[in-house]
Image: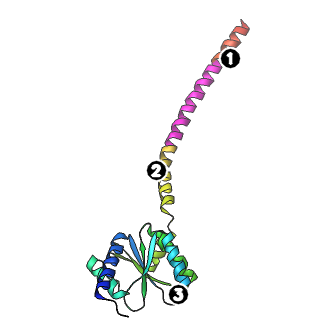
Amino acid sequence: MAISKARKEELVAQYIEMLERSNAVIFTEFRGLTNTEMTKLRRAVREAGGAYHVTKLTLLRRAMEQAGYPIPEYLSGAPLALSFCYDEIPGVAKALTEFAKENEMTVIRGGLMGDQFLTLEQIEALAELPPMEVLRAQILGLLEAPAANLVGVIQSGVAQVVNVLNAYIEQGEEGTATAEAAG
């Protein structure tokens, strides 16, 4: 069934909005997936902070041209779906790579982050990154470590001075006590 011109314009506008809202887009082939598998994939991507949409390639190409995005060479031929990464890119990449490992019918073709194309290897590398909260904690730990070490060094230096003073005081008290006992 043919799509009306008004519906095509609506889809192009929707694709442009999703592209502009997204931090990255990952292209996948989905041919041969059952409805249950497609639902499972969409849920995994949604839980990772993204959206998974089957697109009409000619309309997607038009939307990418209008929005000023480069067009990947694989944007023709096999039906493609797009995973829009609205939150963190690694979470969506991980959801897709894990699903693709379980289901050989899903093939990750590549991605687009800004105006840079991503290869399958780069997407797999993104999928290996820890969540943003973990990265922030690691960075804070790296920033805090030198300060903690400095405090430890200063404390140990002060503690050594205090120990030496205590030793002199104790030695002086012993010397006074010995002199009083002898006298």
Which quadrant of the structure image shows residue 53? bottom left
Q: In the rendered structure, does residue 24 fall within the stretch colored magenta?
A: no
Query: What percent of the width, then of the height, locates residue 9?
Result: 29, 82
Label 3, on which residue? Answer: 33
Which residue type carries mark 1? Answer: Glu
Q: Give the Cα distance between marks 3 and 1.
A: 88 Å
Q: Give the Cα distance between marks 1 and 2.
A: 47 Å
Label 1 sits on a secondary structure element that is helix
Q: Give the Cα distance between marks 2 and 3.
A: 47 Å
Q: Are marks 2 and 3 in contact (CB under 8 Å)?
A: no
Please give the name of the residue rendered at 51% of the width and 69% of the height, measured from the top-left corner: 47
Q: Earlier in the sequence, mark 2 or mark 3?
A: 3
Q: Quadrant of the N terminus?
A: bottom left
Q: In the rendered structure, does residue 158 fall within the stretch colored magenta?
A: yes
Label 2, on which residue? Answer: 143
Which quadrant of the structure image shows residue 19? bottom left
Q: Rate crowding at label 1 as few (under 14), some (14 to 19) or many (20 or more) other CA atoms within 10 Å.
A: few
Query: What percent of the width, then of the height, locates residue 78?
Result: 42, 91
Which residue type carries mark 2? Answer: Leu
In the rendered structure, which segment of residues is drawn in magenta? 149-171
Q: Tag on residue 174?
A: 1
Q: Earlier in the sequence, mark 1 or mark 2?
A: 2
Label 2 sits on a secondary structure element that is helix
**Mark 2 or 3, closer to the camera:** 3
**Mark 3 or 1, closer to the camera:** 3
Please give the name of the residue rendered at 44% of the width and 69% of the height, measured from the top-left corner: 89
Of residue 130 and residue 79, the one placed in the foreground of this image is 79
**Mark 1 or 2, closer to the camera:** 2
